Amino acid sequence: MRHKYSEIRAAGGDVIAIGFAPIEMLRKQTEELDLPYPFLHDPDRTAYRTLGLGRATWWQVYGPATWWTYARLLLRGHRLRRTEVDGGQLGGDIVVDADGRITLARASRTPTDRPPVAELLAALRGGPGSATG
């Protein structure tokens, strides 16, 4: 998201991240990643429940798909950090248009399941791939 933030803004959108980790951890992550958008604190996971974001099974968290994703990230030079929070909480991506309509709602099926930013931009612009799912 950070790398496509100017493109998202140019399309009339914005980004808001929501996390349940302790507030100091979220602040540190925002600073370390140099995020240009806000990271909201939801320690009770109210937004997660409201948006229907579920929990991963043990296999989804520690299975081959996750290891493969992390291996690719390491090969690209990313530094992995051990999670200090609930790794079983699944996330999601929601796109809301300028009229307040949800044009894409995608709950993650695994901890590493995220749509490409191009899909989020298409939903923001109301183009192909903007269906809710």
Image (cartoon, rainbow, N blue to C red):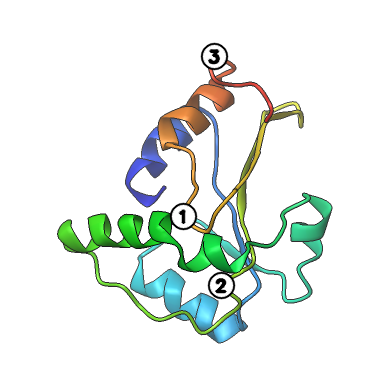
- Mark 2 lies on a secondary structure that is loop
Name the residue nearer the viewer: 37 or 127: 127
Q: Residue at x 45, y 70 (%)?
A: 30
Residue 28's quadrant in the figure?
Answer: bottom left
Amino acid type at mark 2: Gly
Q: Where does residue 102 sit, x and y in percent of width and height? A: 73, 31
Query: For mark 3, does the 10 Å Cα neighbourhood hold few (<14), some (14 to 19), or many (20 or more) residues?
Result: few
Residue 105's quadrant in the figure?
Answer: top right
Q: Where does residue 103 sit, x and y in percent of width and height? A: 68, 27
* Residue 127 image label: 3
61 displayed left or right of 86: left
Q: Earlier in the sequence, mark 3 or mark 2?
A: 2
Q: Residue at x 50, y 56 (%)?
A: 37
The residues bearing labels 1 and 3 have C-alpha atoms spaced at a distance of 25 Å
Q: Are marks 3 and 2 in contact (CB under 8 Å)?
A: no
* Residue 112 image label: 1
Q: Earlier in the sequence, mark 1 or mark 3?
A: 1
Amino acid type at mark 3: Gly
80 displayed left or right of 111: left
Amino acid type at mark 1: Thr
Q: Which residue is mark 2?
A: 87
Q: Where does residue 54 sit, x and y in percent of width and height? A: 72, 57
Q: Up-down: is 77 above or below 25?
A: above
Q: Up-down: is 65 above or below 28?
A: above
Q: Nearer the viewer, mark 1 or mark 3?
A: 1
- Mark 3 lies on a secondary structure that is loop
